[in-house]
Image (cartoon, rainbow, N blue to C red):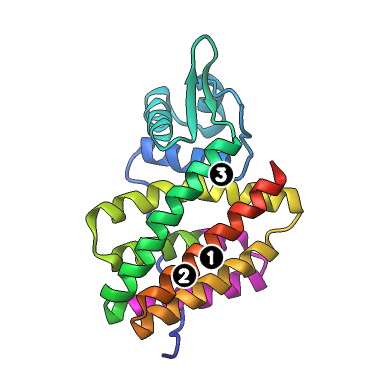
Amino acid sequence: MTAPQLALADEPAPRSLAERAYQLLVAKITRHELPPGAVLVEKALMEDLGIGRTPIREALQRLAMEGLVTHLPKRGMLVADITATGVQHIYEFRGLIDGCTARLAASRATEADARELAALQVGLIRATEDDDIDRYVALDRRFYEVLARAAQNTYIAEAVPRIFNLHLRLWFFIANRRGTWHDIARAHEVMTACVVEAVSRRDPEAAERAMTTYITGRHSDIRELL
């Protein structure tokens, strides 16, 4: 199947101030601008983000539910630490959920889903070549969203976006320690290419194998750095 040209709309504007606060904080936390253990002071966040107290509180509560933020007595809200146990739990979950997602997508994807996944794969390669990490992250997020949609399972569609931010923070953790993001991006592109091909061939086993192999590799990478 020939991959079509990528034609994606711009990211939709946040529907509320709480959503905007959430998106801004996700970006800062996943990219380690707010590193693990950083104390999240509402007044400082209000000044930094230019958003009021209530939306920021709502965003912090949402981040706490996702596991990116934690609350400690007498210390307040902090960016969650990255621990060996936490990393293991994340990758165990990803191995199950993302592997199952890829398997189901290869069985259930529509032709439109397959075309969009192929277009996103092309976009990821071009973003790496252009050294455009913002575009790469946006396309990567969309790739997982489309794969989850193609799996046609309500619970997977809810779980995959939630685990993505935890995965993304670990992805940047590896990239920051290595001093470059291109090598792990290319490894990721090998996986996405294999998944796209497996979806086009309706090969669930190959799709799941490509995904779980990639996840195992990233888990090994981060264990070496902790």
Q: How far apart are marks 1 and 3 (CA)?
A: 23 Å
Q: In which quarter of the image is residue 134?
A: bottom right
Give the side of residue 83 with respect to residue 98, left or right: right
Q: How far apart are marks 3 and 2 (CA)?
A: 27 Å
Circle 1 sits on which residue? 213
Q: Which label sits on residue 161? A: none
Residue extending farthest top: 74
Crowding at label 1, few (<14), some or many (≥20) Cα neighbours within 10 Å?
A: some
Q: Which label sits on residue 30? A: 3
Crowding at label 2, few (<14), some or many (≥20) Cα neighbours within 10 Å?
A: some
Q: Nearer the viewer, residue 15 or 199?
A: 199
Q: How far across and how far down the image is residue 140, in percent?
A: 49, 62
Q: Which of marks 1 and 3 is nearer the N terminus?
A: 3
Q: Quadrant of residue 112?
A: bottom left
Quarter holding the N terminus is bottom left
The amino acid sitting under disc 3 is Thr
Q: Do the residues labelled 2 and 1 touch (CB within 8 Å)?
A: yes
Label 2's element? helix
Q: Distance between the residues labelled 2 and 1?
A: 6 Å
Q: Give the range drawn in magenta.
A: 113-137
Circle 2 sits on which residue? 209
Label 1's element? helix
Is residue 100 found inside the magenta-colored segment of the image?
no
The amino acid sitting under disc 1 is Thr
In this rendering, which labeled residue sits more in front, label 1 or label 3?
A: 1
Q: Earlier in the sequence, mark 3 or mark 2?
A: 3
Q: Which of 88 and 82 is in front in this view?
A: 88
Give the side of residue 79 with respect to residue 205, left or right: right
